[in-house]
Amino acid sequence: MEATLTAPTTTKNSWNGGVSPFKVSWGKLMMWYFLLGDSFSFASFLVTYGALRFSYDSWPVPNEVFKSFPFVEHANWPLMFVSLMTFILIMSSVTMVLAVHYGNAEKDKKKVAMWLFFTILGGIAFLSCQAWEWTHLIGEGMVMTSNPFGATAFGWLFFCITGFHGFHVFTGVIINCIVLSNVTSGVYDRKGTYEMVEKCGLYWHFVDLVWVFVFMAFYLL
């Protein structure tokens, strides 16, 4: 009797390469890792804010600090302007959702470009509003080293945290401009995927989500 030798059956393993074990592309996975790490940066800022906020006996009242409105002399509209800023940022998140949808589901280059353009406009509008708010507060005497509204720490925390967030919005606008250029030139049509738009969408939604916590910390508490 002769022994029959059979070659071992090779079982494809997801960890051997070529297939993502997480059912997601490496690009999106790396974006999630980046956002996770960035969330710790914002969390550190906000924890610092909370620790200092409750270490002072008195703290500036948001309704007194943020009551001005552009082009309205002696306005006394507490939190109206920052509410407008928040609305603009949220709407830019909606337009980004539409850009991702038309890229992934319909591969419609014109609609992706249109909604990305509106997202960029929203980001620029938000940054313009923030620039006006900073200029106005500095004009009233609130800077990194002094604050006429109360605790000095409020001033430097405000400029550091909103500035850090504003830098993220600015970065998102620049990236979206690059992606918009690629969309209009047909780069993603030739690749057969609009995944880059989706990755930018993840970043943009993260920036919007962080603003909710910044808004709560400075303007509501």
Image: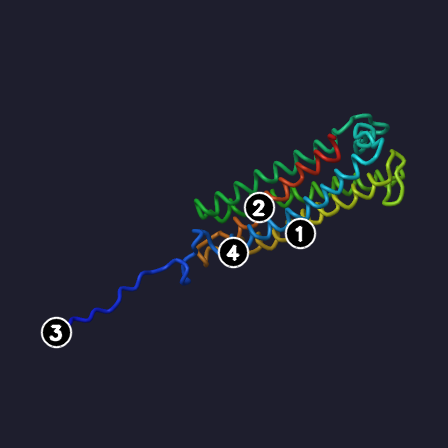
Q: Quadrant of residue 2?
A: bottom left
Q: Is residue 105 above or below residue 15?
A: above
Label at residue 116 = 2
Q: Nearer the viewer, residue 112 or 4?
A: 4
Quadrant where the N terminus sits is bottom left
How busy is the neighbourhood of tag 4: few (under 14 within 10 Å), some, or many (20 plus)? few
N-terminal of the two: label 1 or label 2?
A: 2
Looking at this rendering, what residue extends furthest in the top direction? 76
Q: CA distance from mark 2 to mark 3?
A: 70 Å
Residue 49 rendering spot, x and y as whole percentages: 76, 40
Q: Nearer the viewer, residue 220 or 193?
A: 220
Residue at image mark 3: 2
Q: CA distance from mark 1 to mark 4?
A: 18 Å
N-terminal of the two: label 2 or label 3?
A: 3
Q: Secondary structure at mark 1?
A: helix
Whether pointer 1 and pointer 4 mark residues with C-beta atoms closer than 8 Å, the reply is no
Residue at image mark 4: 27
Label at residue 171 = 1
N-terminal of the two: label 1 or label 4?
A: 4
Q: Secondary structure at mark 4?
A: helix
Residue type at mark 1: give it.
Answer: Thr
How busy is the neighbourhood of tag 1: few (under 14 within 10 Å), some, or many (20 plus)? some
Labels 2, 3: front one? 3
Q: Nearer the viewer, residue 191 or 169?
A: 169
Q: Quadrant of residue 48?
A: top right
Residue 114 appears left or right of 73: left
Looking at this rendering, what residue extends furthest in the bottom direction? 2
Q: CA distance from mark 1 to mark 2?
A: 15 Å
How busy is the neighbourhood of tag 3: few (under 14 within 10 Å), some, or many (20 plus)? few
